[in-house]
Amino acid sequence: MNALQLLRTTNGLEGLRLPVNSCKIFVALRDIVRLEGQRNYTFFVLKNGQKILISKTIGDYEDVLPPNFVRVNRGCIINAAYLDFSFNGCYRLKDGYEIPVSRRKVKKLEAIRQAA
């Protein structure tokens, strides 16, 4: 089993190599908007709207990703760079996607938003 790790290209771009079909593709961290967990699978949602299905759990990626990726509930990790605003306990990303945030993660997300 391959260990998950962040990779850096020669031009300094950080990202992950994701197994898709019979090959691996490089996805830059700056292009990842959110990760959505679906049982034993994870959808990577990119800023161009593309969804990539990976057969690993969302928890496998939680420890690998840098601190600007925040797990906001059981099934979603967001890239804080794409956080737009909040209302009534839900947060909206710049692509218009609304995410309910668990009570334990609200303070952490607010601190990140204030720092940005």
Image (cartoon, grey):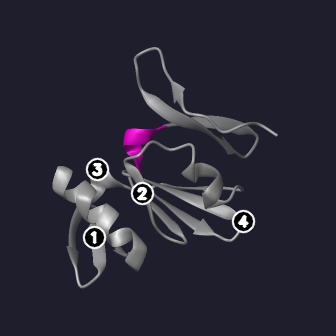
Q: Residue at x 68, y 71 (%)?
A: 39
Q: Residue at x 25, y 64 (%)?
A: 110
Tell me the element at label 2: strand
Q: Is residue 6 left or right of residue 90?
A: right
Q: Which residue is mark 4?
A: 40
Residue 52: % across, % down: 57, 54
Q: Which mark is residue 70?
A: 2
Mark 1 to mark 3: distance in Å?
Answer: 12 Å
The residue type indicated by label 3 comes to Ala
Looking at the picture, tell me which residue is in the foreground, 72 or 97.
72
Q: Earlier in the sequence, mark 4 or mark 3?
A: 4
Residue 114 visible from this viewpoint: yes
Q: Earlier in the sequence, mark 1 or mark 3?
A: 3
Start-end of magenta stretch: 28-33
Q: Is residue 112 left or right of residue 11?
A: left
Mark 4 to mark 2: distance in Å?
Answer: 19 Å
Q: Residue at x 65, y 52 (%)?
A: 60
Q: Is residue 87 left or right of residue 29?
A: left
The residue type indicated by label 2 comes to Val
Residue 58: % across, % down: 61, 59
Q: Is residue 109 left or right of residue 15?
A: left
Most extreme residue toward the bottom is: 88
Q: Residue at x 33, y 71 (%)?
A: 106
| Quadrant housing residue 14 | top left
Q: Earlier in the sequence, mark 4 or mark 2?
A: 4
